Image (cartoon, grey):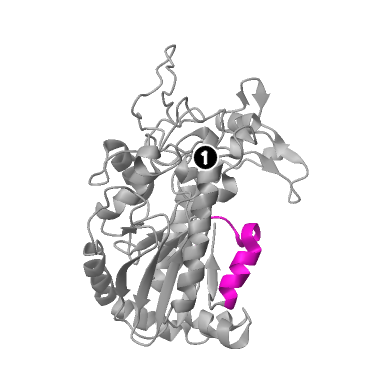
């Protein structure tokens, strides 16, 4: 999913409490502004490129949670006038061409081995692939298409005895490449509007984030991480108005592992120091964006405790699942959950730290605008987000 708020629209939202002000922000002046945007495009892109190349305001941490609650280096945008940023989330496809470490081999699946992330025939080819999810009616009261039925649509009609059901609504060329289609629309809009930065709300790599165990060195990037970032991110989101733009990012539940907690979530943090645009120095942090005539404070939060349950509960949507976490799963060495048994409590405590930090920092902000960035929608913690709104938070961007 992606969307594009304009700063002028936010100003109207604060002044008049009406989303209708977005139309006045982008109405009759659009054509004149577009000409001005294109004239300033090369200059602004160079400024942002220089900033992103020096984005590591301090070196990589020894452990991935070390910079939690820190303030990342300020982004300064020299262009004045109406400004744009884009938002995107739940975007990362599956890298079926990857051979993960400790790969499960046919007829020799050792405990703790990692299968390739392939859901259907052809899913092993390079580029992003789809995880065929179950499909329900709008009220989520009637199952229209099971996982096996949906996979059968990709496999040409049948899969493990299941047939491609009309209820799946499968459309060749649409369901087979959703990330590419959204990315193409994203790139086309970026070429028109020249956004200054991207807000990324997580679920960056399906099915379970970086396909290796937590605990790799923070001072480098593994070959697995490089393969997935090149295939799913770097090779997809490039082009006029998009290349070299900062991606201010958080982790989603699938980045922690989806239905386990010990995948390479820490490598997504480490990638901050291996990229000229990826920004994720910690699971929660803040960042200032300064324009000539206004400023923004962005507060990135990790809300993935919403998907951390007791070990026996909902194994397909549970970071702490006893069914899918491998035997002896632990991220204790890097400050993460120590075991399946302690997993839910760890995420609850971590979320409490996030909330206490935000409650302290949001009222202290001297910026003109305060924006929250997190993965889970505000309905999960409506009282907390209402409290932040009362403290001055103007906009919450979620997955």
Task: Name the one closer to the observer, 374 or 11.
Answer: 374
- Closest to the observer, 386 or 29: 386
Highlighted magenta segment, given as a residue range:
373-390
Q: How far from the left and from the top, in percent, is residue 182?
A: 49, 55
Q: Is residue 72 visible?
A: yes
Dividing the picture into quadrants, the one containing residue 186 is bottom left
Q: Residues within 10 Å of mark 1 (few under 14, many from 20)?
A: many
In this rendering, position of residue 94 left or right of residue 241: right
The location of residue 175, given as percent across then percent down, is 56, 43
The residue under the point 29% across, 62% down is: 244
Give the camera-side residue of 245 and 52. 52
Instruction: Measuring from the top left, give residue 272's x and y in whole percent.
Output: 30, 54
Helix, strand or loop at label 1? It is helix
Identified at 42% across, 74% down, the residue is 297
Res. 12 image quadrant: bottom right
Judge whether 242 appears above or below 344 on screen. below
Picture coordinates of residue 188 (x, y %)?
Answer: 42, 63
Instruction: Find out whether residue 314 is within the magenta segment.
Output: no
- Magenta includes 378? yes
On the image, numbered disc 1 is attached to which residue? 343
Compared with 219, 246 (above or below) is below
Secondary structure, magenta segment, majority class: helix
Left or right relative to 30: residue 275: left
Count numbered badges in the picture: 1
Residue ranking furthest to the top: 107
Residue in the picture at 26% in, 59% down: 276
């Amino acid at each position: 999913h992606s969307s594009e708020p304009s700063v002028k629209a936010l100003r109207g939202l604060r002044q008049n409490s009406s989303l209708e002000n977005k139309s006045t922000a982008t109405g009759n002046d659009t054509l004149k502004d577009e000409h001005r945007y294109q004239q300033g495009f090369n200059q602004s892109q160079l400024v942002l490129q220089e900033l992103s190349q020096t984005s590591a305001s301090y070196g990589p941490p020894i452990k991935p949670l070390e910079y939690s609650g820190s303030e990342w280096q300020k982004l300064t945008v020299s262009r004045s006038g109406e400004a744009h940023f884009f938002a995107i989330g739940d975007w990362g496809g599956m890298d079926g061409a990857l051979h993960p470490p400790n790969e499960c081999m046919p007829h020799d699946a050792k405990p703790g081995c990692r299968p390739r992330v392939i859901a259907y025939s052809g899913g092993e080819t390079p580029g992003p692939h789809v995880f065929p999810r179950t499909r329900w009616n709008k009220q989520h009261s009637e199952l229209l298409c099971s996982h096996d039925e949906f996979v059968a649509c990709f496999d040409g009609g049948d899969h493990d005895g299941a047939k491609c059901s009309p209820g799946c609504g499968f459309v060749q060329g649409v369901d087979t490449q959703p990330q590419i289609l959204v990315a193409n629309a994203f790139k086309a809009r970026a070429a028109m509007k020249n956004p200054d930065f991207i807000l990324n709300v997580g679920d960056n790599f399906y099915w379970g984030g970086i396909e290796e165990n937590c605990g790799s060195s923070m001072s480098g990037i593994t070959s697995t991480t490089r393969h997935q970032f090149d295939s799913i991110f770097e090779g997809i989101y490039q082009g006029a108005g998009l290349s070299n733009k900062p991606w201010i990012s958080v982790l989603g539940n699938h980045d922690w592992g989806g239905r386990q907690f010990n995948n390479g979530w820490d490598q997504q943090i480490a990638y901050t120091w291996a990229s000229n645009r990826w920004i994720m120095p910690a699971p929660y942090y803040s960042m200032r964006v300064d324009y000539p005539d206004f400023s923004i404070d962005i507060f990135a939060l990790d809300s993935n405790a919403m998907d951390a349950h007791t070990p026996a509960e909902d194994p397909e949507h549970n970071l702490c699942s006893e069914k899918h976490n491998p035997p002896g799963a632990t991220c204790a060495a890097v400050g993460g959950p120590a075991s399946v048994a302690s997993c839910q409590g760890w995420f609850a405590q971590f979320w409490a730290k996030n909330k206490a930090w935000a409650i302290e920092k949001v009222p202290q902000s001297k910026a003109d605008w305060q924006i929250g960035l997190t993965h889970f929608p505000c309905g999960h913690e409506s009282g907390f987000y209402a409290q932040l709104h009362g403290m001055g938070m103007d906009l919450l961007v979620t997955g």
